[in-house]
Amino acid sequence: MAFLQIEQVPVLSDNYVYLIYDPATQACACVDPATAAPVKKRLTELGWHLTHILNTHHHHDHIGGNLELKEAYDCEIVGASIDAARIDGIDTQVRDGDMFTFGSASCKIFEVPGHTSGHIAYWFEEDKALFCGDTLFALGCGRLFEGTPAQMWHSLSKFKVMPDDTRVYCAHEYTATNAEFAITVDPANAALQERMAEIKTLRAQHKPTVPSTLGLERATNPFLRPDTGGVQKAVGMTGADVVDVFAEVRRLKDNF
């Protein structure tokens, strides 16, 4: 069983880059390096040598540091086969259902289109860690720039196979704003009300709200709850098709 160390590196205004270190082999991965300098600084502080970059999708605030890091560390860049043309410096192409070996650990690849057409997520089952990029956020999900509501709902539904204690390492600190919206479409949710208070406390102390857990997201994230009576009632769609409800929640958030 792997026992990975995970470091969170805040970059830009609200991005998170993650470093994953396997003490057994000294393999070290960087997930979605928006920019290289803060990553290199933290690697030096930790004494880790970067061996891999794991990209979830092609947006510049996720691959912006790829080439500089590859030049500095001669690391292997991993990304989606279906989006290889848009991943700078890609070496290894992965597909839905693939198992990717990282040091003494392995992760399962999920194709999760919606935010972009070629978005993927990395699930380290033994370490209870999901790196989902901009597909799932704490109390939110990514905007549908290249996909449809049906695609995004199907993508989010893939995470249902994962246990509640899976940690959700999303790529942005959007939680406070997401919470303000979530309560408008799930106002009777006591768990959400409690979570909002915790978020306010954390942000007042300038502490991150990420990672969360899938169990917490299932209980409070409206984008995982379009099949619940509370959300359907709040958006005036009781008994409607779940994809239609999801689409309405996403539309409301886009205009919030």
Image: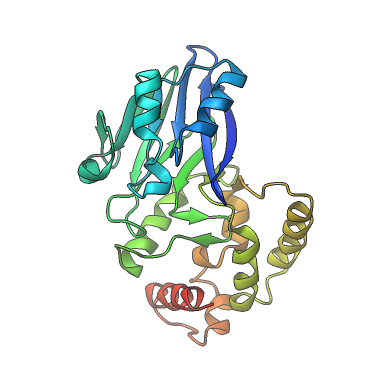
| Quarter placement of the C terminus | bottom right
Residue occupying the point 20% across, 43% down: 85
Q: Is residue 4 visible?
A: no
Q: Residue furthest top?
A: 25
Reply above or below: 160 against 45. below
Point out residue 242 in the picture as x, y percentages from the top left corner. 41, 73
Horizontal side, residue 113 vs residue 133: left or right: left
Numbered circles on residues, count: 0
Q: In the rendered view, how is the structure colored?
A: rainbow
Residue 11 found in image quarter: top right
Residue at horizontal 50%, vertical 73%?
253
Q: Relative to residue 14, is residue 105 depicted above or below?
A: above
Quadrant in which residue 75 is drawn:
top left
In which quadrant of the rendered view does residue 76 lie?
A: top left
Q: Nearer the viewer, residue 111 or 56?
A: 56
Residue nearer the viewer, 177 or 183: 177
**Does residue 89 lie above or below 26 as drawn?**
below
Where residue 58 appears, as percent x and y from the top left, is 32, 47
Q: Is residue 134 above or below residue 229?
A: above
Q: Residue furthest bottom?
A: 236
Q: Is residue 184 left or right of residue 223?
A: right
Q: Position of residue 38 (x, y in %)?
A: 54, 33
Q: Position of residue 188 (x, y in %)?
A: 69, 76
Residue sitting at x 40%, y 75%: 247
Which residue is depicted at the point 32% across and 62% down? 151
Is residue 104 in view? yes
